[in-house]
Amino acid sequence: QVQLVESGGGLVQAGGSLRLSCVVSGSIFRIETMGWYRQAPGKQRELVAYITSGGTTNYVDSAKGRFTISRDNAKNTVYLQMNSLKPEDTAVYYCKADLISATTGWAAYWGRGTQVTVSS
């Protein structure tokens, strides 16, 4: 059974920083793309950033220059360093991994999310 567990969310003042982590566990053969999404109340879930197994990254325009995605392949972990946070960054942040597992082959898996709240 593959599991993704996020951590690192919380309440922070505008201008502050948070570092999110997501650990992938289970019978995994290979993890390709790992990413962070967010969903604010009343809005659709949106991609924030992703990173491929080769290290290629991509960010939503609102995150460029403020957020940095990275991964530790040895630990099956992806990170999102968020700096200069704004109230509009408030959302539930979800981790997603595209991977090959022993039971399902290629599939996309999601974590349960971690709340990020930025106060003004």
Image (spheres, grey):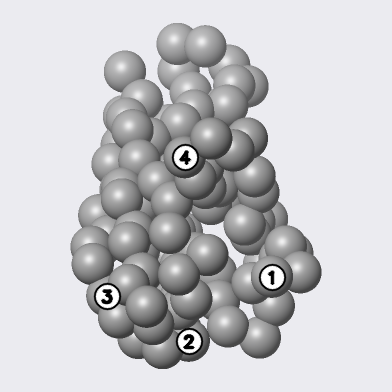
Residue found 37% across the figure and 78% down from its top: 120
Per the model, the C-alpha gap separating discs 3 and 1 is 18 Å
Mark 4 or 1, which is nearer the eye? 4
Dot placed on the residue nearer the N-terminal end, 4 or 1: 4
Q: What element carries label 1?
A: helix
What residue is shown at x 31% (from left), y 50% (from top)? 115
Tell me which amino acid carries mark 1.
Answer: Ser
Q: Mark 4 points at which residue?
A: 41
- Location of mark 2 (residue): 84
Cβ atoms under marks 3 and 1 closer than 8 Å = no
Q: Provide the secondary structure element on which disc 4 rests.
A: loop
Q: Which amino acid, mark 3?
A: Val
Say which label, 3 or 4, has the lower sequence index.
Answer: 3
Residue named by callout 3? 12
Q: Left or right? Give the position of 103 relative to 53.
A: left
Q: In this view, does 98 lie above or below 104?
A: below
Element type where label 2 sits in the image: loop
Residue 90: image location, x then y, percent: 43, 59
CB within 8 Å, label 3 to label 2 = no
Q: Where is mark 1, residue-wise?
A: 62
